[in-house]
Image (cartoon, rainbow, N blue to C red):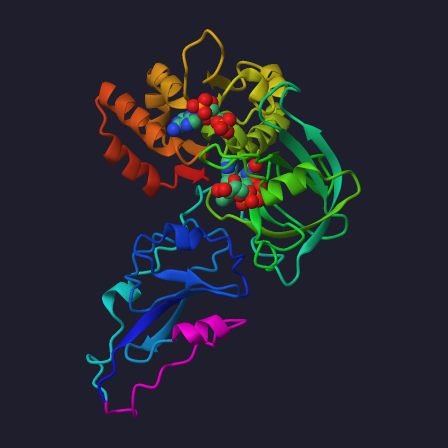
Amino acid sequence: MNAELVRQHLIDPEICIRCNTCQETCPIDAIEHDARNYVVKFDVCDGCNECIPPCPTGAIDSWRKVTKSKPYTLAEQYAWDSLPAETEPDVGAPGDVPEEVVRITAEATAGTGGPLAPPWSAAHPYVNLYSLARPAVATVSGNYRLTAEDASSDIRHIVLDFGNSAFPVLEGQSIGVIPPGVDANGKPHHVRLYSVASPRNGERPGYNNLALTVKRVVEDHEGKAARGVCSNYLCDLRKGDQVKVVGPYGTSFLMPNHPGSSLMMICTGTGSAPMRAMTERRRRRMALKEGGELMLFFGARAPGELPYFGPLMKLPKDFIDINFAFSRVPGEPKRYVQDRIRERGEKVARMLADPNCYIYVCGLKGMEAGVNEAFADVCRAHGLDWSAVLAGLKAQARFHVETY
Ligand code: FAD
Ligand code: A2P
């Protein structure tokens, strides 16, 4: 019998939070879902692995060895509550298959692509401690508006207390919130992700709590009126309310821990949440004089729209180099973070070349292309080739992007 073994790409239904990221990311529409599960079409998936890094839970990085002619069908995948156990597929009686005939295909053994690597000195993150079937229940201990009263956006600092439930997080990780109620089809709302805005030892040091930076969504990406399910739920919470939380998630967008390491942080709007967590971690350790630099590029419509504007302004200038980019200040030209990156080209080029500098980009999806172009321009002006620099940054786990 001649049976070719391959690894079949699957999604672990126990860990999957049904956030749709994989389906959105897949360039060839190999992923689909029903109300119960996300599944992978065996005959379409070409193992490009583009869906692997964006998956917040790692559920997408699931593989089973199968005979090529007998993969798990979509009907089987839709019916699963958990992945089938790893078994050796039936390849015929021992001895009747020459070793060179039964082979795992090169692409199947070439690794899964896997999640991106964290900085080498990052602390070990815990992930998937709480699932949809067993969420943590947090109590709201504060909900404060961060944007000015007359600002167009309502961005809030929401503090969640986990009481006696262990919920360890690192700066850069995110958590999932389960909004109560059901969608238009009567199905429970899917989980939404929010970056942790506090350092690892808590919003209040020593307390089992963390903060989120949540923007109330009142219009869709095209500017049409839309009431965001989870952001409105969170922004309307009151002290003492209980929230179901899953996670934590994220194994690569983490900060380096070694003395002398520097951070270049580029964000817009609520993309400031992980930057606040990292900056606050460094601020609390300032007295240790561990060295390294912090450089921040922060884009918002106007100062009043910028979360954490007041606290940021109070930070010592020799602690953090802050570069704001305001796009809608009357009488001033529109500026984006990428404009500020170009203006600070000299220092940016130096930091890109510093092996101890780690770069973080978080916020609007649309900023990614602009930030890349700005880095390319800076590199060109300093005799560097951005594509080569970027490849090096990625290989050294020094370039981390989280946009939504
Ligand atoms: P939905 O009910 O899902 O959507 C309502 C409508 O608004 C839809 O048309 C939708 O397309 C559109 N829409 C969705 N999101 C936005 C948006 N951000 N701006 C404008 N229109 C939108 N959000 C935060 O506020 N703070 C965070 O720290 C944060 N961190 C995130 C981290 C990760 C890794 C990811 C993937 C997302 C993060 N988000 C964050 C976005 C968050 O998960 C939700 O997508 C967002 O709050 C909207 O959810 P909703 O239920 O209110 O809107
Ligand atoms: P704009 O005034 O053009 O919308 P928001 O308030 O919607 O969260 O946006 C935060 C900031 O990011 C705003 O200043 C917004 O400018 C800006 N922005 C919008 N698109 C991009 C982009 N492609 N690159 C960088 N910044 C952007």
What x and y, as percent, mark residue 169?
Answer: 60, 45
Q: Residue furthest right?
A: 240
Identify which residue, 150 or 398, lies in the foreground.
150
Q: Is residue 125 left or right of residue 179?
A: left
> In this rendering, is residue 116 above or below 316?
below
What is the quadrant of the N terminus in the image?
bottom left
- Looking at the image, can residue 174 be seen? no
- Image quarter for ligand 2 equals top left
Q: Residue at x 60, y 35 (%)?
A: 214
Q: Is residue 172 left or right of residue 70?
A: right
Q: Position of residue 95 (x, y in %)?
A: 25, 91
Q: In front: 207, or 76?
A: 76
| Residue at x 77% of width, y 44% of height | 241
Q: Characterize the magenta stretch by its predominant secondary structure.
A: loop
Magenta residue check for 80: yes
Picture residue at 41% right of the left edge, 61% below the top: 32
Residue 388 shows in this picture:
yes
Magenta-drawn segment: 73-96
**As drawn, 252 above or below 292:** below
